[in-house]
Amino acid sequence: MAAERTIWERMFWSWRPESTREAGDAIVRNFLLHWFPAKVLRESLSFRYSFWLGTIAAVLFFLLTGTGVVLMFLYVPSVERAYASVKDIEHVVSFGWFVRSLHRMAAHAMVAVVFLHMMRVFVTGAYRNGVAADQNRPLNWIIGILLLLATLLLSFTGYLLPWDQLAYWAITVGTSIATAAPWIGDEIRFLLLGGHEIAQNALLRFYVLHCFVLPAAVLVLFSWHMWRVRKDGGLACADRLAREQKREWAAPIRSKTYSLLGIARGRTIHIETAVIDEEEHTVPASPVLVRRLVLVALGTLIATSLLALVIRAPLEEPANPSVTPNPAKAPWYFLWLQELVALTTVRIGSYTLNGAFVGGVLIPGLLILWLAVWPYLDKSSVASVGVWFPAERRRQNLVFLLIAVGILILIFTGTFMRGPYWEFYWPWELWPEIPRRF
């Protein structure tokens, strides 16, 4: 059969096997499919459990890599030529505006999808070990937190590269928050910028971080994350299915020996075993999982492309350190920190509470620490693992969702309700005309 196939069919035969044996061989012989088990649970393929958010995030990362490589051939990381090269991409290069918009939209979408993926894992209790042996899901949860932080930094470092007013002052605000870290704040900012101001050294460092260091870190963490998913027995819904599986007693096979010299513990000389119906709950990874992966990848690409057509990547005036926009805002995913800094800056008489430290360092640091250690503090039973909103985890899920909603409210407020001098304005109110500060 294999000898009769064309070269094209030999390359892709494993994606459409014609028998159960070929389906199993497809996973072993194919480099890409070797990541997956020969059979997967039907439940893990369901959209209603995981929404395939992890796969969508991975597709967005590879989309960012592809569009980023194209942009690297056209971009010049120099303060004298960066803005002009981006302007050429927008107005001179054929479909350059679309590639840039697609890259930017995928970056924003990846931040949002990774955050939603973390929310899904938390509310389903999928960061906890289940019934299988040798699981270490808390470690994989920590790897996921590192992936979220790397994703934020990946988007943040790319924000400066257009070298326009929006980029320059967003990075100014973002790096200024880092200086509030006690003892090492100034050193962190100096390390990021390569000096005391945003200039050529900062642009070059952000370019290297954005194009090589952080993508490599994300790729390594992603590979480790996927490997841990396999080692932990797949998605947490597998543990729920194992707990709900009914025991079915199979008759002993006459030709098989179940005891040693006729001696066995129990009511009979035969060992009783529970049989899990794989035919009912599992399907071959090839072609079922492969088709679903292709469907999700195409859907992600189409949705991101449509958004890139509707929402063009902005390009403001060239960066000018002498002209300060009012208000100057951080990137949208860091606006909740900027809003926290404003809310926690409290003046009591002659004393001023350092909001940059409280809102920009202390509170987010405690949140990250809480997320990292919570799997080891969570005492809920294994019956809640892989279950959406179980009753015994109602309180901790409520606290987590309130924090997440609070962050979203702060982002919305900073985006649409903060005007000149960071004053509060309703979205329908007009801002007063403020002269530029030189």
Image: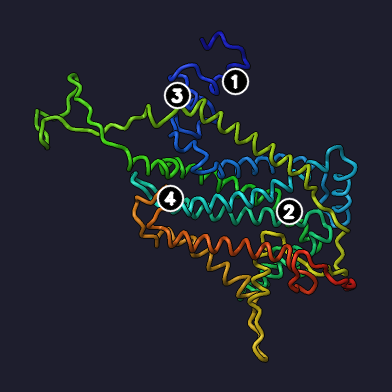
Q: CA distance from mark 2 to mark 3?
A: 42 Å
Q: Earlier in the sequence, mark 2 or mark 1?
A: 1
The tag earlier along the polypeptide, 2 or 3, is 3
Dot 4 or dot 3, earlier in sequence: 3
Label 3 sits on residue: 24
- Distance between mark 2 and mark 1 Cα atoms: 37 Å
> What residue does disc 2 label?
158
- Image disc number at residue 287: none
Which residue appears at 55% of the width and 55% of the height?
146
Query: Residue 314: x and y, percent?
Result: 81, 52
In the drawing, does residue 246 fall left or right of residue 111?
left
Disc 3 packing (10 Å; few <14; some 14–19; many ≥20): some
Amino acid type of disc 3? Gly
Disc 4 element: helix
Q: Are marks 4 and 3 in contact (CB under 8 Å)?
A: no
- Secondary structure at badge 2 equals helix
Q: Residues within 10 Å of mark 2 (few under 14, many from 20)?
A: many
Task: Determine which residue is flagged by label 1.
Answer: 11
212 or 433, nearer to the observer: 433
Q: How many marks?
A: 4
- The reply to whether residue 193 is visible in this rendering is no
Q: Sequence order check: which comes first, mark 4 or mark 1?
A: 1
Residue 55 in the figure: left or right of residue 122 = right
Q: Nearer the viewer, mark 4 or mark 1?
A: 4
